[in-house]
Image (tube, rainbow, N blue to C red):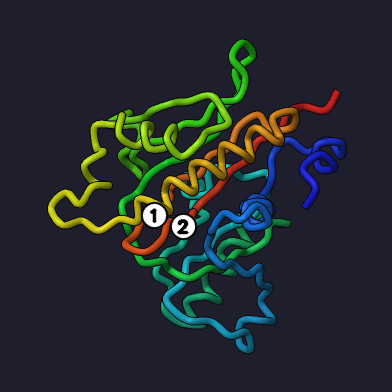
Amino acid sequence: MDIAQLRRQGRKYLSESEVKTILKDYGIKTTNFTLINRDQIESIEINFPVAVKVCSSDIMHKTDVGGVFLNVKSREELRECHDLITSRFPGASVLVEPMEKPGVEVIVGLIKDRTFGMSIMFGIGGVLTELYNDVSFRLVPLDRFDAEEMIDEIKAQKLFRGFRNIKTDRDSLIDLLVKVARFGDEFKEHINQLDLNPVFVRENDTIVIDAKLVLEPFN
């Protein structure tokens, strides 16, 4: 998927499926999602439970508008969620993905500043992001040493060093930060903002659960 071409087309916001496809192409691990229509529900191979989400470039805050259903356990429930989404949001797609094993929730983002350029942000994620505001910043690109420093600067850094026997794959988190920073540096002309929240840092991997991307206006 060509970010520059999407921007030339006048796109500002991308759907979750588009953002995750771009990230996967860049070697960043995200959930394995499927866009479904109602006719596929009976025949498609699904491992329940799943998350069901509205998928549209016009809807950035899916949870706020009632567009996310978690722990959907059967085809009957999936059908009900599909019908609710399509009735509430005509023209939107329906995204289905596995309920992932949780981990330590973090947020990773890219933010463009008109003075300083593109920077990467890292911190504790999920619902705690705004409450604790426990974040660190760097200009892009990063090396692994920079990424380690970012992790160690936040107050919750002990979570990534075995605090209370919480197991996290620190190396895969470092890899993610380096890749996101490289992505931001490579496409800094086209990207205004990237928001990966939450990201689960688990015992053996780090995975992006939700993703938003805002493009620069094309003049």
Q: Residue at left 46%, top 71%?
A: 50
At which x and y percent is residue 77?
A: 47, 77
Task: Name the residue type under label 1.
Answer: Phe
Frontmost residue, 102 versus 13 = 102
Q: Residue at left 65%, top 35%?
A: 214
Q: Residue at left 53%, top 24%?
A: 139
Q: Do residues under tags 2 and 1 come within 8 Å of each other at their CB atoms?
A: yes
The outermost residue toward the bottom is 43
Please determine whether, in this image, residue 50 is positioned above or below residue 112: below
Residue 111 lies in quadrant: top right
Q: Residues within 10 Å of mark 2 (few under 14, many from 20)?
A: many
Q: Which residue is denoted by mark 1 in the rendering?
A: 200
The outermost residue toward the left is 164
At which x and y percent is residue 125?
A: 37, 42
Quadrant showing the C terminus:
top right
At which x and y percent is residue 100?
A: 41, 66
Disc 2/disc 1 C-alpha distance (Å): 5 Å
Find numbered disc 1 in the image and state the secondary structure of the residue it sits on: strand
Task: Name the residue type under label 2.
Answer: Ile
Q: Earlier in the sequence, mark 2 or mark 1?
A: 1
Residue 42 lies in quadrant: bottom right
Q: Which residue is denoted by mark 2 in the rendering?
A: 207
Frontmost residue, 37 versus 121 = 121
Find numbered disc 2 in the image and state the secondary structure of the residue it sits on: strand
